[in-house]
Image: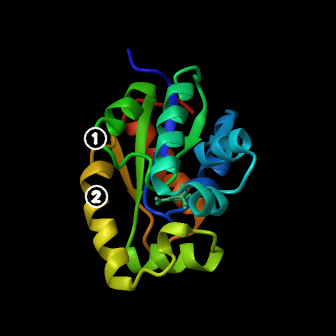
Amino acid sequence: MRRDNIILVGFMGAGKSVCGRLLARRLGRCFVETDDMIVAREGRSIPEIFREAGEPRFRELEAETIESLKLKSGDVIATGGGMPCRDGRMDALRELGTVVWLDGDVRELHERASRIGNRPMLDGRSMGEVEELYRTRQSYYRQAHVTVDTTGIGADQVVARILKALRDAHAVRA
Ligand code: S3P
């Protein structure tokens, strides 16, 4: 039987953090973010890690984080947008529980992510390059157990859709 965590994956700006926090509250579960785990462990911000150690080091830290997620059960876990996008990563995440892909219109995702800022993967990338990055990542995200489209709706509605999808997949009873 697979573990009973709920793991949110998806591109930057999909609302994994905001919706994950709301979802955890609705279900009375703990909420964890892989980016926060990395920041706490490293004692520096994500942009600092990218700047000082480079993206490959950040990806190694993500791999180590997946290992420590194996200790979790019953949690809602928000992952960084690039975490599932390496071979074998989606299999590892699927082992932890039910994986939910928060998808959406790439321009809308980009708009939302840029508004919040602090995304080294968006720095210096044109819209065309961001679309290309999104396209290369889709084949990984698509391996999620369920997909929720966030286009044009707010966090409350996204959470309602996630709950419905989880109930339909018999992943939660609430
Ligand atoms: C990244 C997404 C970020 C963070 C890091 C790299 C990516 O998380 O992990 O900046 O490669 O897409 P969010 O998806 O929460 O923005």
Q: Residue furthest front?
A: 52
Where is residue 104 shown, x and y percent of the image?
A: 39, 68
Residue 7 drawn above or below residue 75: below
Q: Earlier in the sequence, mark 2 or mark 1?
A: 1
Q: Can you say whether 61 is above or below 126 in the image?
A: above
* Residue at point 39%, 45% (across, down): 84
Q: Quadrant of residue 89?
A: top left
**Does residue 155 appear in the picture of this structure?**
yes
Identify the element where label 1 is drawn: loop
CA–CA distance in space, label 2 to label 1 = 13 Å
* Residue name at image x 55 percent, y 61 percent: 15
> Viewer-proximal residue, 158 or 71?
71
Give the amino acid at mark 1.
Answer: Asp
Please name the residue that numbered disc 2 is placed on.
Answer: 138
Tell me where residue 99 appears, x and y as whole percent.
41, 39
> For this view, does 173 lie left or right of residue 148?
right
Occupied quadrant, residue 53: bottom right
Quadrant of residue 19 within the rendered picture: bottom right
Q: Is mark 1 within 8 Å of ligand 1?
A: no
The number of numbered badges drawn on the structure is 2
Residue type, label 2: Gln
Tell me where residue 33 appears, x and y as whole percent.
62, 44
Q: Which quarter shows the N terminus?
A: top left
Left or right: residue 163 versus residue 101 is right
Q: Residues within 10 Å of mark 1 (few under 14, many from 20)?
A: few
Q: Is label 2 in a helix, a strand or a loop?
A: helix
- What residue is pinned by disc 1? 87
Please indicate, yes or no, whether residue 13 appears anywhere in the rendered image: no
Closer to the observer: label 2 or label 1? 1
